[in-house]
Image: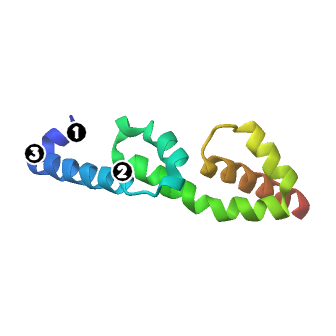
């Protein structure tokens, strides 16, 4: 409905962007299939959201690997708390816990 005030040109732009994002999602390699399948559940929100979900999870991977070495107990806690959730949510959990520790240590 909000697109109505901008006319059909805006609707066509949205459609083209959605189609382009869907095509990009289809090009992810097979090893990312679990991430793609989980993020694809959000397709009703648009393929741009799906692509962002996938890209964010890919970007969170190196941080989670580092946390596995440096903060294994904290990572395990967040993985248990957010089992089945995206890597970005688990990374956010660890980041928040580390920030809280820093704040408490500073006091």
| Residue 36 in picture, x, y percent from top left | 48, 47
Quarter of the rendering containing residue 80? top right
Q: Which residue is mark 1?
A: 2
N-terminal label among 1 and 3: 1
Of pointers 1 and 2, the one earlier in the residue sequence: 1
Vertical comparison of 25 with 62: above or below: above
Task: Say which element carries label 3.
Answer: loop
Q: Position of residue 23 (x, y in %)?
A: 30, 53
Say which of marks 1 and 2 sits in front. Answer: 2
Name the residue that disc number 2 marks.
48
Q: Secondary structure at mark 1?
A: helix
Q: In the picture provided, is 39 more to the left or to the right than 12?
A: right
Disc 1/disc 2 C-alpha distance (Å): 18 Å
Q: Which quarter of the rendered picture does the C terminus lie within?
A: bottom right
- Residue named by callout 3: 7
For marks 2 and 3, the one nearer the N-term is 3
């Amino acid at each position: 409905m909000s697109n109505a005030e901008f006319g059909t040109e805006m609707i066509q732009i949205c459609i083209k962007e959605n189609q382009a994002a869907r095509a990009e999602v289809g090009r992810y390699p097979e090893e990312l299939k679990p991430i793609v399948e989980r993020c694809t559940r959000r397709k009703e929100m648009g393929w741009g959201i799906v692509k962002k979900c996938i890209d964010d999870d890919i970007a969170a991977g190196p941080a989670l690997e580092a946390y596995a070495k440096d903060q294994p107990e904290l990572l395990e806690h967040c993985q248990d708390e957010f089992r089945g959730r995206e890597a970005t949510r688990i990374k956010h959990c660890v980041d928040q816990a580390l920030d809280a520790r820093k704040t408490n240590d500073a006091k």
